[in-house]
Image (tube, grey):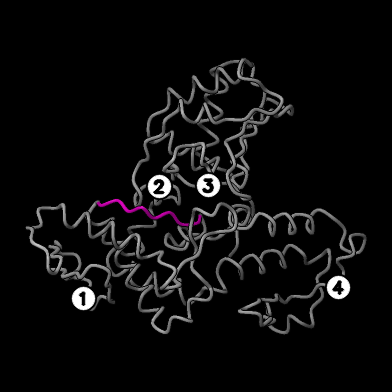
Amino acid sequence: AVVSTQSGHYGRDRRSPEELKSRLYVIFEGEEGQDAGGLLREWYQIIAREIFNPHYALFTTTPGDKVTYVCNSFSHYNPNHLDYFKFVGRVIAKAIYDNKHLDCYFSRSFYKHILGQSISFKDMEHEDYAFYKSMMFLLEHDLVEAGLDNLDFTMEIEEFGVTETRELKPNGHEIAVTNANKKEYVKLISQMKMTGSIRSQIKAFLDGFYDIIPKHLISIFSDTELELLISGLPTIDIEDLKANTEYHKFSLTSLQIQWFWRALRSFSQAERANFLQFVTGTSKVPLQGFSSLEGMNGVQKFQIHRDDRSTDRLPSAHTCFNQLDLPVYETYDKLRKNLLLAINECPEGFGLA
C-alpha cells in the first residue's frame, strides 16, 4: 500500500484492514525520495506528533503528570472526532505491527482499555491525584463525622462553563451514599471519570486498533509491556537520575542508598524501564534529562523516602510525586530482590468491573 502525504495535512484512512497490514510505502508529495524504510519512520514520527495536536482536540494530558495522555472528553467539538480516533487506533496498531516505535505515552487506564483489562481505583492516583486523595478520605472516614453524608450517586461535569449532572446508576439522584455503599460509589465515579465520560472515543479507537491487531493477540501483554511495545525501551542514564534525586530521612551515604544505586546499575534496560514506570507512571525520559522530570505540580525530581515500617514490606511508589518509599533493608541482596519484585508485580487496589 502507498501512503501519499502532504506536509501538514492528515486525513482519515479509508483503506481496509487487510490493505493496512501490507507493507506501506510513503511518498511525501512534492518531495523526491525512495522509501527504503526511512520515509516510513519519518511518517510515523510526524503522525505521532499530530495525534496530540490541540487543533484536533483528541487527547489531553493527565492532571497527574502533564506527560501522559488520555482521550479528551470534549473531543466531540471536532465533528469528525470518532473517525479520527479510529484512524489513530489503526496507526498505533500498525506501528506495533511494523515494529516502529512512536513518541506516544498514554495513561495506565488507556493501556488497560486496549488490553481489555479492568480499570482499578489505584489507576486514578496517577491520572488525578487530588481526586484520588478525596476518594481515599471518603473511604477511610465515617461519612457523617466527616460531613459527607449529603452525597448521592451522581457526578457533576463542567463543560465550557455549563455544569451537567450525570447519574452513576439508574435513579442515582435518589440514592444516598452511605458507609455501607461508599465502595460502590467510589468504584462507579472512578469508572465514570476514566471510562464513562469517554466511552465513545475509546470504542472508536479500539475499533481501529483491533482492525490491525485483534484483541485476543494484544491482551497477552501487561499495561507496562504495551507501553514499551508502542514507545520502545528508553535509554536511562542512571548517573543523570542519581544527580537529580532528593532524599528524605536518607542521605547519599546511607547504606541502603548505596545499595539502591548499585542495584539499579545492575538492572537490564527492560528492568530499568519497569523501574521508571513504577516510580513515575511512564517510561518516558524527559528530553532535557531527569532535571526536568514532571510531577503533579510541575517539575518534580525523583525522590527516595525512608520507610521505617517492616523490612518485610516491598518498596512502594507515589507516581504523582515521582516518589519511592524504600524500607531499611538489612542486606543488598534483600533490597535488590524486593525492588525487582515490586517493579515487576506492581500490586494494585480493587478492580472495577
Magenta stretch, residue numbers: 100-107
> Looking at the picture, which amino acid does disc 2 mark?
Glu
- Judging by the rendered image, the residue that carries numbered circle 1 is 16
Which secondary structure class fits the magenta region best?
A: loop
**Does 49 sit above or below residue 330?**
below
First in sequence: mark 3 or mark 4? 4
Q: What percent of the width, then of the height, locates residue 163?
A: 69, 81
Contact? badges 3 and 1 (CB < 8 Å): no
Q: Amino acid at mark 4?
A: Asn
- Residue 232 appears in view: yes
Residue matched to label 3:
281
Q: Which label number is shown at residue 225?
A: 2
**Which amino acid lies under the numbered mark 3 shown in the image of this protein?**
Gly
Dot 2 or dot 4, earlier in sequence: 4
C-alpha span from label 1 to label 2: 28 Å
* In the rendered image, the vertical position of residue 36 relative to residue 288, given as above or below: below
| Precedes in sequence: disc 3 or disc 2 | 2
Measure the alpha-carbon separation of dots 3 and 1.
35 Å
For label 2, the crowd category at 10 Å Cα-Cα, with few meaning under 14, some 14 to 19 and many 20 or more, is some
